[in-house]
Amino acid sequence: MAIWPHDAAMKQLSIHARLPGNFRSVLKNGWAERRRNGAAADCFLEGPCCDERGWLWCVDIANSRILALSPDGAWEVGYQYDGWPTGLKLDRQGRCLIADNRWGLLRLDPSTGKHEVLADSFEGAPLHGPNDVTVAASGDVYFTDQGDSDILRPYGRIFRWRDGKGLELIAAGFPSPNGLVLTPDERFLYVAVTQANAIWRVILRPDGGLGKVGHFVQMSGSLGGGPDGLAMDDVSNLLVCHALAGCVIVYDRFGEPLERIRTAEGLIPTNLAFSRREQGRLFVTEAETGTIQTIRLDHPGHHPYTLE
């Protein structure tokens, strides 16, 4: 099988919304110096997720904030704080679960404007730097602890946090674990391993234990990036943001490529999420242009629970 067969479908995203100029600023929060070799950015959108009302939430790492986009296209700052938010999901209660590259796994209650730290260390040592987060139907929270790991320093980890039970190490030895998503039956956890340019698959046992970890898809190309955010539709197709390749790639459950979806602008699609109101509507954050891009696909997204 070719890595990308010539007969696979090609589609293109369109612009849904653009972050206005008055929402953009170059904030020296330390993130650019640490993670982008000092390259400044007036915004860096990541971690989209949708609520039942049609609002789209996302993070702006460069400006240390959570943003919210209304159904009619109005932007709001949902929360501003001294952190590096990189991943975001909403739990059943509509609270924001934040993978913060600086502070750890956080939980924000938008109704009160207060956040709490759920996990910032493991076995007495600080986390390397969480990147993304996903939530099971049970409420269990999985997140990647990426830090500066790469092929020469494969110390990235996957953790599970359970309410009342705390933090549990699921797997280690990843060269830059990034986005992650569960299959609809929650038997498998897929992880974007950016510096390996690959998607790895983690087998989860019914008793909560760990099965084998292995490659699912070996990707190729990009201008120094790799797979970033992941999403899953309701027939177990896997959607992968290929950062610095300017596209989203859709794979079936066997790892066969089905579609390549080009960005409308920019080369850095960072993450993606399906609408909870419009079946098949996909939203993608593109960091280079500060845009939310969109497309209508054949299958609706998989949502493991309904927001209360």
Image: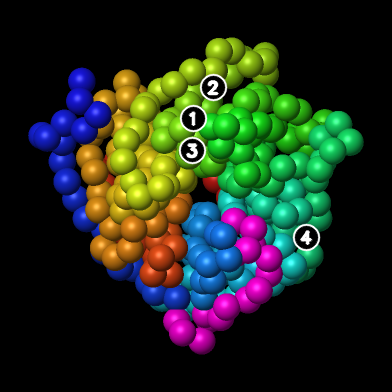
Marks 4 and 3 sit apart, C-alpha to C-alpha, by 31 Å
> Which sits in the foreground, 307 or 283?
283
Disc ID at residue 195: 3
Question: Image check: 216 left or right of 297?
Answer: right
Marks 2 and 1 sit apart, C-alpha to C-alpha, by 6 Å
Marks 2 and 3 sit apart, C-alpha to C-alpha, by 18 Å
Could you say where residue 192 lies in the image, as x and y percent from the top left?
48, 36
Identify the residue at image location x=67%, y=52%. 101
Q: Which residue is mark 2?
A: 202
Q: Is residue 205 above or below residue 88?
A: above
Question: Image check: 52 left or right of 80?
Answer: left
Residue 195 sits inside the magenta stretch: no
Between discs 1 and 4, the one toward the N terminus: 4
Q: Which residue is mark 1?
A: 190
> Which sits in the foreground, 271 or 91?
271
**Number of marks in the image?**
4
Identify the residue at image location x=81%, y=43%. 126
Between discs 2 and 3, the one toward the N terminus: 3
Identify the residue at image location x=41%, y=35%. 197
Disc ID at residue 115: 4
Asked if the residue at tag 3 contacts the one at tag 4, i.e. Cβ–Cβ closer than 8 Å, the answer is: no
Asked if the residue at tag 1 contacts the one at tag 2, i.e. Cβ–Cβ closer than 8 Å, the answer is: yes
Judged from the image, the secondary structure of the residue bearing numbered disc 2 is strand
Judged from this view, the residue extending furthest toward the left is 7
In the image, what residue type sits under mark 2? Answer: Val
Judged from the image, the secondary structure of the residue bearing numbered disc 4 is strand
Which is in the foreground here, disc 4 or disc 3?
3
Marks 1 and 3 sit apart, C-alpha to C-alpha, by 15 Å
In the image, what residue type sits under mark 1? Answer: Tyr
Question: Which range is magenta?
Answer: 20-35
In the image, what residue type sits under mark 3? Answer: Gln
Marks 4 and 2 sit apart, C-alpha to C-alpha, by 30 Å
